[in-house]
Amino acid sequence: MTYVNGQNIYVTDGTNNLLLYGTNSMNLKQGDNLIFNYVGKIWGQLYRYNKLPELKFSAIEDVTVQQGGTVTPKTITADKLAENINGYVKIENAEYVSASGKNLTFKVGDKGYKGLVIINGKKFVNK
């Protein structure tokens, strides 16, 4: 888990990122790993919310939770945001401008960015 906030659970397989939305009945935390047993699976429906992909899951079955991992943000340049949707990233040379609710504005050099963020820069949309 790269990040957990209530019903929002951000996961990665090391290459791809996805937001799982639903109950956190397993009490998953940032740094936890799901180890899928022989028939382990996640049940749900894939949606687009705020133009971003998420899986509204109804069940996670036959998995073991390995706790206590460390999560480090992937350092990227601002032009790579679209390639890292739902990822835990650190934007190189980004300078904070302002925040209002879930909207964050930052700049890199003279170029400004405004986006949707879910705490600590986990999710952006460039506008």
Image: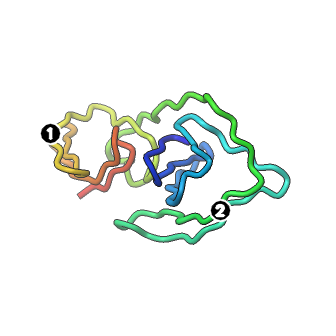
Q: Would you say the residues marked 2 and 1 are in contact, meaning their CB atoms lie under 8 Å apart? A: no
User: Which sits earlier in the primary sequence, circle 2 or circle 1?
Assistant: 2
Comparing labels 2 and 1, the label whose residue is closer to the camera: 2
Q: Nearer the viewer, residue 72 or 7?
A: 7
Q: Nearer the viewer, residue 34 or 61?
A: 61
Q: Residue at x 73, y 57 (%)?
A: 61
Q: How is the image coloured?
A: rainbow
* Category of crowding for the residue at label 1, using alpha-carbon neighbours closer than 10 angstroms: few (below 14), some (14–19), many (at least 20): few
- The quadrant of the rendering that contains the N terminus is top right
Where on the picture, by quarter, is residue 97? top left
Secondary structure under tag 2 reads: strand
Q: Residue at x 56, y 34 (%)?
A: 31
The disc labelled 2 sits on which kind of residue?
Answer: Ala
Image vertical order of residue 64 relative to residue 55, above or below: above
Expressed as whole percent of the image width and height from the top left, the position of residue 98 reads: 14, 42
Q: Residue at x 76, y 49 (%)?
A: 36
Which residue lies most toward the front here?
Answer: 25
Q: Residue at x 60, y 29 (%)?
A: 69
The disc labelled 1 sits on which kind of residue?
Answer: Val
Image vertical order of residue 55 relative to residue 116, above or below: below
Give the label on residue 74, or none. Answer: none
The residue that label 2 is drawn on is 59
Where on the picture, by quarter, is residue 65? top right
* Category of crowding for the residue at label 2, using alpha-carbon neighbours closer than 10 angstroms: few (below 14), some (14–19), many (at least 20): some
Residue 91 horizontal side relative to residue 69, left or right: left
Expressed as whole percent of the image width and height from the top left, the position of residue 113 reads: 21, 49
Expressed as whole percent of the image width and height from the top left, the position of residue 34 reads: 68, 44
Give the label on residue 97, or none. Answer: 1
For the residues labelled 2 and 1, the Cα–Cα distance comes to 40 Å
Residue 37 horizontal side relative to residue 45, left or right: right
